[in-house]
């Protein structure tokens, strides 16, 4: 087994239960993670014999899908903990807006390359009754294999990274609530970190938000100094339910909005910095025009903690799912 990314589109709950129960029973000795709604998880687990149920770890799907960067890191940890192979059946939760929708689609589009070396089968379950035509087209564009009544079959509509890999010229405008704070990226990263810390504390950010902001901007600023123009700017501001931070590079910077997702990116300093940054923030956008680039970081107030997917496997992992 290498990485397999499969889409399961369904309109009837009974068909969903029968199909997924069959996948769980046929998994053999492979470990399985089940990340669907509590109601569906309870029904699926109760339909399994005891030996098959013991191999299934039911987790909170909102925690698995805490953010695109952290979700990918969680899948990598899961694959590392179980190199013999693992089955993941997941039902992505509803997202809140256009930005979140777009970034999750990009995440789906890059999985086949981001997880190519690992032994994992990821089955993404989508209730078609809740999908718009555009949502359904995105599912088809990002899953190379679909599961039908007769089992898996190749998806002729699959596009992979080509589906959502274009870099926008600029991020979509967001309302600004309060002041826009501007800082310069110069030769001294310690100075920038001190300025960001003071800013976060003065604005009433909690300690976790301040730490994540400082760490993420430091990673990006280091890339500006080492690989870009050597100078740039930082803007920090508030909108709605989040803090937003723009880090700009006057020359250079990432040109691929998927940078930081794929393993090969980790071989280059810039890609490694973005790999870290995608896990620190909740959403990350890469935009730019000409030679310059901008990375926008989103830090949500109601940050969802990602679920730990390594370590022991047992009944305690299914707490809350009955």
Image (cartoon, rainbow, N blue to C red):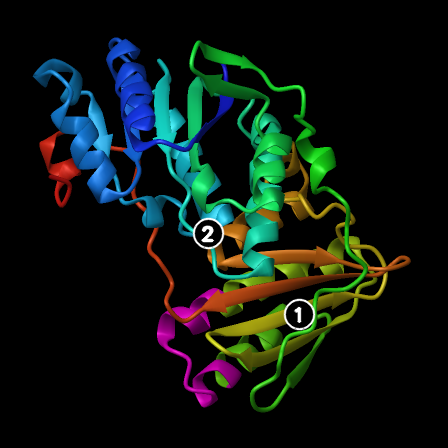
Q: Quadrant of residue 296?
A: bottom right
Q: Is residue 217 left or right of residue 26?
A: right
Q: Is residue 46 left or right of residue 83?
A: left
Badge 2 crowding class, 10 Å Cα cut-off, few under 14, some 14 to 19, many 20 or more, is many
Residue marked by disc 1: 246
In the figure, 110 relative to 60: above or below? Answer: above
Element type at mark 2: loop
How far across and down, in percent of the image, does residue 146 sit? 52, 21
Badge 1 crowding class, 10 Å Cα cut-off, few under 14, some 14 to 19, many 20 or more, is many
Q: Is residue 159 left or right of residue 16?
A: right
Please tell me which residue lies in front, 146 or 317. 146
- Give me the residue at 36% from left, 29% from top: 89
Residue marked by disc 2: 67
Q: Quadrant of residue 250?
A: bottom right
- Give me the residue at 41% from left, 33% from top: 11
Q: Quadrant of residue 151?
A: top left
How far across and down, in percent of the image, does residue 67 sit? 46, 51
Question: For the C terminus, which image quadrant?
Answer: top left
Which portion, as a residue range, is magenta?
A: 199-212
Decide whether residue 224 is among the magenta residues.
Answer: no
- Give me the residue at 67% from left, 19% from top: 156
Mark number, residue 206: none
């Amino acid at each position: 087994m290498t990485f397999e990314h499969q889409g399961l589109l369904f309109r009837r709950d009974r068909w969903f239960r029968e199909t997924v129960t069959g996948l769980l029973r046929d998994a053999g000795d492979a470990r399985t993670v089940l990340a669907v709604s509590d109601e569906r998880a309870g029904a699926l687990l109760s339909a399994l014999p005891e030996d098959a149920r013991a191999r299934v770890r039911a987790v909170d799907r909102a925690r698995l899908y805490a953010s695109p960067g952290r979700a990918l890191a969680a899948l990598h940890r899961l694959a590392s903990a179980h190199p013999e192979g693992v089955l993941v059946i997941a039902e992505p939760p509803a997202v809140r807006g256009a930005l979140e929708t777009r970034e999750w689609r990009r995440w789906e589009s890059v999985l086949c390359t981001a997880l190519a070396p690992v032994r994992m089968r990821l089955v993404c379950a989508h209730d078609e009754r809740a999908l718009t035509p555009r949502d359904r087209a995105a599912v088809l564009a990002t899953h190379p294999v679909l599961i039908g009544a007769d089992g898996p079959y190749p998806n002729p509509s699959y596009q992979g990274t080509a589906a959502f890999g274009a870099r926008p010229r600029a991020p979509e405008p967001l309302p600004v609530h309060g002041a826009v704070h501007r800082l310069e990226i110069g030769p001294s990263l310690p100075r920038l970190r001190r300025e960001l810390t003071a800013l976060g504390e003065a604005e009433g950010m909690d300690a976790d938000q301040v730490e994540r902001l400082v760490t993420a901007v430091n990673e990006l600023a280091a890339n500006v100094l080492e690989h870009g123009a050597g100078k740039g700017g930082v803007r920090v501001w508030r909108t709605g339910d989040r803090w937003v931070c723009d880090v700009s590079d006057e020359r250079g910077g990432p040109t691929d909005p998927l940078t930081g997702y794929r393993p090969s990116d980790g071989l280059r300093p810039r890609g490694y910095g973005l790999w870290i940054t995608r896990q620190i923030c909740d959403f990350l956008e890469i935009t730019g025009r000409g030679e310059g680039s901008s990375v926008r970081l989103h830090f949500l107030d109601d940050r969802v903690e990602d679920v730990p997917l390594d370590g022991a496997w047992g009944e305690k992992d299914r707490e809350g799912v009955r």
